[in-house]
Image (tube, rainbow, N blue to C red):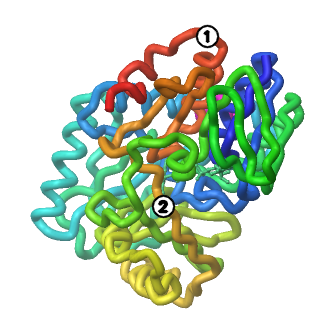
């Protein structure tokens, strides 16, 4: 069987690998170099996602296990998966209450969450944080993880190539008709199946795919990520402080993200000015990082289905074409890769059932 996978981000990379391991002849087509994709720059928080949809929670719990399987399979590559958990807290009564509700929900679902005193956090987990203004407990989710997306993709694609995947970079697909793909060059590739994992680019390949347009600030489509220069006192895990999220990067660098500033992003944002606003928040949370500079700024558009869930499955009316489009694609990529491989080979996967394109 021959399968053409479009997209070499977390989703397409994992799908190509799992298909090749199942004996499929795989071509992986990507417009961007993998290191330039949204997945390579993403914040990379991997967690069980509770959006009050049981199927989505179950998918994301299985995703944690799929990350472990992928890490075991790529153990020879530089480490890309870090099992250090996530800290979350509020700075006023309203945000502390909101955090408590979130923590209670996870607790009910059986997902481990611990309420910690700030002094315990400083003693046992993150001595460099400034926690004077914490209201309520600091919630610690020990089973959350973080991923360095660029390293993850390198590891996955190296293994995929070794398993026989042929990667064609710098080639843009213009349209998919069943299991045939038309390239910008005018060439056409035909396979037994086409798997569209083009992230936000899926909308150009599948007419009417319900992904939100970039300019919907209240639904967080555009996002800005800042990578800093190395800092004297980094953190070792994902931190969600009020107004600033931080995760460790290589060489004592940090990646920063501010949800509220994402809402101000326009089509042509002054990304450097916004990055300085993000950076200015850092010393308030992590005083030992004062003096850090901006090393890289990345603006991406989340592939956000209109109902906030994933889209997984055969494309109606386009025989031979299968699509995966999702937010949280770094969290879900490894499990979606496994699911896609199984389904393209003919066996439906129960975790994908709630997310079929036909639901729209
Ligand atoms: C600010 C921000 C923070 C985020 N934080 C997290 C987080 O903490 N955890 C998490 O899990 N997710 C997070 N996400 C979301 C996550 O990054 C994405 O869901 C994920 O990267 C999508 O992966 P993907 O493989 O579907 O797409 P991408 O990584 O975007 O890859 C798409 C691929 O398709 C290719 N492509 C596109 N169109 C074509 C075409 N026509 N022809 C050929 N190739 C094409 C591209 O070149 C690329 O190779 C965040 C996103 C943003 C913006």
| 343 vs 99, nearest the viewer | 343
Q: Secondary structure at mark 2?
A: strand
| Picture quarter with the N terminus | top right
Residue at horizontal 77%, vertical 49%?
A: 154
How far apart are the alpha carbons under marks 2 and 1?
Answer: 32 Å
Q: Are marks 2 and 1 in contact (CB under 8 Å)?
A: no
Label 2 lies in ligand 1 vicinity (Cβ under 8 Å): yes
Give the x, y percent position of residue 111: 34, 33
Q: Secondary structure at mark 1?
A: loop
Mark linked to residue 346: 1
Which of the marked residues, 2 or 1, is nearer the chain's N terminus?
2
| 75 vs 195, nearest the viewer | 195
Q: Which residues are magenta?
A: 67-71
Mark linked to residue 301: 2
Quarter of the figure with residue 282: bottom left
Q: Main secondary structure of the magenta part?
A: helix
Q: Is residue 308 left or right of residue 295?
A: left
Pick out the residue farthest to the front: 186
Give the x, y percent position of residue 196: 61, 37
Task: Count the numbered circles shown.
Answer: 2
On screen, 181 above or below 221? above
* Residue 314 in view here: yes
């Amino acid at each position: 069987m021959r399968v053409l996978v479009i997209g070499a981000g977390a989703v397409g990379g994992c799908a190509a690998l799992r298909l090749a391991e199942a004996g499929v002849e795989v071509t992986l087509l990507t417009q961007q170099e993998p290191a330039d994709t949204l997945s390579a720059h993403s914040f990379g928080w991997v967690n069980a996602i509770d959006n009050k949809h049981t199927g989505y929670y179950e998918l994301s719990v299985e995703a944690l296990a799929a990350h472990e399987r992928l890490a075991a399979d790529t153990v020879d590559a530089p480490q890309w998966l870090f099992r250090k958990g996530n800290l979350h807290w509020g700075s006023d009564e309203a945000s502390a209450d909101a955090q408590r509700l979130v923590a209670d929900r996870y607790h009910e679902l059986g997902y481990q969450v611990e309420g910690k005193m700030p002094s315990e956090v400083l003693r046992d987990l993150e001595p460099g944080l400034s926690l004077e203004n914490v209201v309520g407990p600091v919630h610690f989710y020990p089973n959350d993880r973080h991923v360095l997306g660029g390293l993850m993709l390198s590891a996955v694609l190296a293994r995929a190539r070794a398993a026989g995947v042929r990667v064609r970079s710098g080639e843009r697909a213009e349209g998919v008709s069943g299991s045939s793909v038309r390239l910008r060059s005018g060439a056409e590739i035909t396979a037994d199946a086409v798997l569209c994992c083009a992230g936000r680019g899926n909308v150009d390949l599948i007419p009417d795919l319900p992904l939100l347009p970039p300019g919907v600030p209240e639904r967080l489509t555009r996002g800005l990520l800042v990578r800093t220069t190395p800092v004297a006192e980094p953190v070792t895990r994902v931190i969600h402080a009020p107004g600033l999220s931080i995760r460790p990067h290589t060489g004592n660098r940090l990646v920063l993200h501010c949800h509220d500033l994402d809402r101000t992003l326009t089509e042509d944002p002054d990304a450097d000015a916004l990055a300085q606003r993000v950076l200015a928040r850092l010393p308030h949370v992590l005083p030992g990082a004062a003096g850090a500079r901006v090393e890289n700024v990345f603006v991406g558009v989340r592939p956000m289905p209109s109902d906030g869930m994933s889209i997984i499955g055969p494309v109606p009316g386009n025989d031979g074409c299968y699509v995966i489009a999702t937010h949280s694609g770094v969290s879900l990529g490894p499990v979606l890769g496994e699911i896609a491989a199984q389904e393209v080979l003919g066996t439906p996967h129960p975790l994908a059932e709630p997310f079929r394109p036909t639901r729209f």
